[in-house]
Image: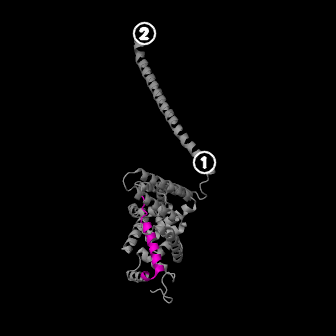
Amino acid sequence: MKNTKDNACPMQKNEGELLLSYCAGSLAAERVAEVERHVGVCPECRSWVEGQQTVWQALEAWEVEPVSADFEAALFARIAREEKAAGWQRWREAWRRLLPGGLDWRVAAPAGAIALLLVVGLAVENPFRREQAEAMVKLEAREIEKAERALEDLEMLRQLEPLEEETRL
Amino acid sequence: MAVATFEHDAELMLRVREGDAQSFALLLAKHRGPVIHFLYRMIQNQAVAEELAQEVFLRVYRSRASYEPTAKFTTWLFRIASHVALNHIRDGKQERNQESLDQATDEGLGRQVASSAPTVEQRMLREVRLAEIRRTIELLPAKQRAAVLMHKYQEMGYAQIAVALECSESAVKSLLFRAYETLRAKLAHMAGRG
């Protein structure tokens, strides 16, 4: 790799990639010695390599800050929120599939109101009916009790009748 | 080794696709550092970098169902990270970050001056030097900056960077050469300063 007209240096041949790989330390071992020999005799490439090594060292000096301790917790919280939202979305999608025309609120709202009224109506109606039935049972029991007492009175009068006749005689 | 890592990461991601949350936690633990550091160097604001990194990993998680190991996992991951970073810069949020960078640098210098010990001058010089490096990187066009950061810190090859930046390999070479040319010109005075 001589710097001659026939066999120009990597820079002249626009092969800076070779020198860049050399500076980055990613050049194949068998080519390193070749580049080093060339850089030793070519001032232009030597200058390029020195400049690139300066950049490399400067970038290596750029340290980074430590990652926040709560980074992962915050990410998992975001994922949990997304999963929850996705759950609701799936639920809505399921309803949309059930209602082919989609969930039209102009229809759904009155239907919901009617359903609510029915539920409330049944809840209110049932105790009333139960109370009525209980009152009827109590009333019937009282009537039976009255009839039994009347029968007992009649029986007692029937037993008293022969005694009255004996007294008259 | 690289092949083993490739297979391992892809395998973990395939497990995530099957609903294994533990595999996602493993991938996160392994790659969160490089992703956050890449975003930090792109945006130069730690809080914003972490916020964007959350977005990156959220996108990874969202894409689990459609994930196919057609490329190296890190290439796919940095494709998402580059996309998020470039979008953030494109949306014009960079100026605000620069203000905070200036503020952080000033505060940093203030702290150095206030501290005791004979290393004050050295520390100040180091801070000034780092601020200059950061500023020089930040002045690069966003795509050149992303290419340099992936090349230098993630040790990604041209083909990987091309996939991450959604361009051809020759375009990546062009981006890198122009970027390094600018950096060599602007940082040349740092030669021999350790």
Work out which quarter of the rendered image holds the C terminus of chain B and state it: bottom left
Residue type at tag 1: Ala
Residue at the (53%, 55%) spot, across then down: B99
Observer-nearest of A137 and A20: A20
Tell us which disc is closer to us: 2 or 1: 1
User: x, y percentage for residue A53?
Assistant: 43, 72
Magenta region includes residue A63 = yes
Observer-nearest of A136 and B41: B41
Output the chain of dot 1.
A
| Label 2 with label 1: CB-CB less than 8 Å | no
User: x, y percentage for residue A64?
Assistant: 42, 60
Which residue has dot 1 on it? Answer: A109
Above or below for A133 versus B37: above
Output the chain of dot 2.
A
Work out which quarter of the rendered image holds the N terminus of chain B and state it: bottom left
Mark 2 or mark 1, which has the lower sequence index? 1
Q: Is residue A139 visible?
A: yes
Above or below for A81 versus A20: above
User: x, y percentage for residue A73?
Assistant: 41, 54
User: x, y percentage for residue B110?
Assistant: 45, 52
Q: CA distance from mark 2 to mark 1?
A: 88 Å
**Does residue A116 appear to the left or right of B18 in the view shown?**
right
Disc on res. A168: 2
Residue at the (50%, 69%) spot, across then down: B183
Q: Range of the magenta residues? A: A39-66
| Quadrant of res B22 | bottom left
- SS for dot 1: helix
Above or below for A81 versus B135: above
Residue type at tag 2: Arg
